[in-house]
Image: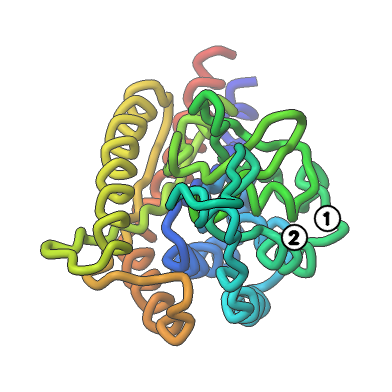
Amino acid sequence: METINQNKKKTPKVGVVLSSGGLKPISSLALFEFLDEEKINIDLMVGCSGGGVLAAFRGTGYDNQQIIALATEFLSQKVFSKVDYQTVLNIGRLPYGKFDVSKGLFKKGLFLQTAEKLFGGHQLEALQTKTLLQATDIQNGEGVILERSSLAEAVYASLAMYPLLPPICIDGRWLIDGAFSSPLPVLEAVKRNMDVIIVMLFHEELVREPKKFVDGFSNITRAVSLSLIKSQLALAIDLHHHEIIVINVPFVNPVSLSDVNLIPGLLELGRRAVDEKKEEILHAIKRYGHVESVQSSQGG
């Protein structure tokens, strides 16, 4: 019995967690490419905001080239072109201004329509790989993990950058960008008992002397996100019983959603970051099998 236990190959449950980051998570394609080459199966994907979009693409079964093409098409639709003028008038306390929980500065119509074009007909719970998307309940600030939903609506909820984009109502809750509650939802992979968790972070430096409102607003959101990531990642490492491997992709210059011309450079940054962690990933998986075999042998 001991010999059988010692020789039996143990396969760890592998989780991939992609943080928020707008367009930057497209650099995670390098990780998927590596895992495919090594024939490492992904048991769970958890994504937030831009990372959620990439997880949805991957879970739907698109390959890397298709994802690049579709992401480029998605971000070329000028999804921030339809202003909600009633909201703008309300901000200025002008006549005919109107605001409620369902509104933002832009209308969600074109954004949601584009998501439906890319993901229409797919349900989150039916994807090829178990996929969870992080959102935030705007009415109480609680993080919400989406597990069963229209994929298009779940993707929209996970990246609804309030107050630019309005919330969306799913199962009676008004949801916005998951980055407000958990920009790196690694704790969800811990809760799901993944043995090896591979985390991809997309860190962007703050603009030191912002001269535009957008830069100042982005600085605040990045600072808050970084604080949440540090605390939640530290807790996950403390709780986790096996390996958490963090791949940090650094970005010196700001990257906006419309910077589709930067995609080749983002992919290269992802490859460099993944290259530095390949041996650690392989070692974690092999080590898990060794540890499990020893434990089984001792238990037998």
* Picture coordinates of residue 114, whole percent (x, y): 72, 68
Q: What's the residue type where badge 1 is placed? A: His
Secondary structure state at the residue bearing disc 1: loop
* Picture coordinates of residue 270, whole percent (x, y): 39, 69
Would you call the spot at circle 1 few (<14 residues within 10 Å), some (14-19), or many (20 or more)? some
> In this view, which residue lies farthest toward the front?
95
Location of residue 169 (image quadrant): top right
Q: Nearer the viewer, residue 245 or 133?
A: 133
Q: Is residue 18 left or right of residue 270?
A: right
* Picture coordinates of residue 142, whole percent (x, y): 51, 26
Q: What's the residue type where badge 2 is placed? A: Thr
Location of residue 53 (image quadrant): bottom right
- Mark 2 or 1, closer to the camera: 1
Q: Is residue 202 above or below residue 4?
A: below
Residue position for label 2: 60
Q: Nearer the viewer, residue 92 or 159?
A: 92
Q: Are marks 2 and 1 in contact (CB under 8 Å)?
A: yes
Picture residue at 50% right of the left edge, 56% below the top? 88
Picture residue at 24% right of the left edge, 57% below the top? 216
Q: Is residue 216 left or right of residue 9?
A: left
Would you call the spot at circle 2 few (<14 residues within 10 Å), some (14-19), or many (20 or more)? many
Q: Quadrant of the C terminus?
A: top right
* Picture coordinates of residue 5, whole percent (x, y): 61, 27
Q: CA distance from mark 2 to mark 1?
A: 8 Å
Number of marks present in the image shown: 2
Q: Is residue 43 above or below residue 63?
A: above
Residue position for label 1: 122
Q: Nearer the viewer, residue 33 or 66?
A: 66
Asked whether residue 34 appears in the rendered view, the answer is: yes
Q: Quadrant of the N terminus?
A: top right
Q: Is residue 240 left or right of residue 33?
A: left
First-in-chain label (2 vs 1): 2
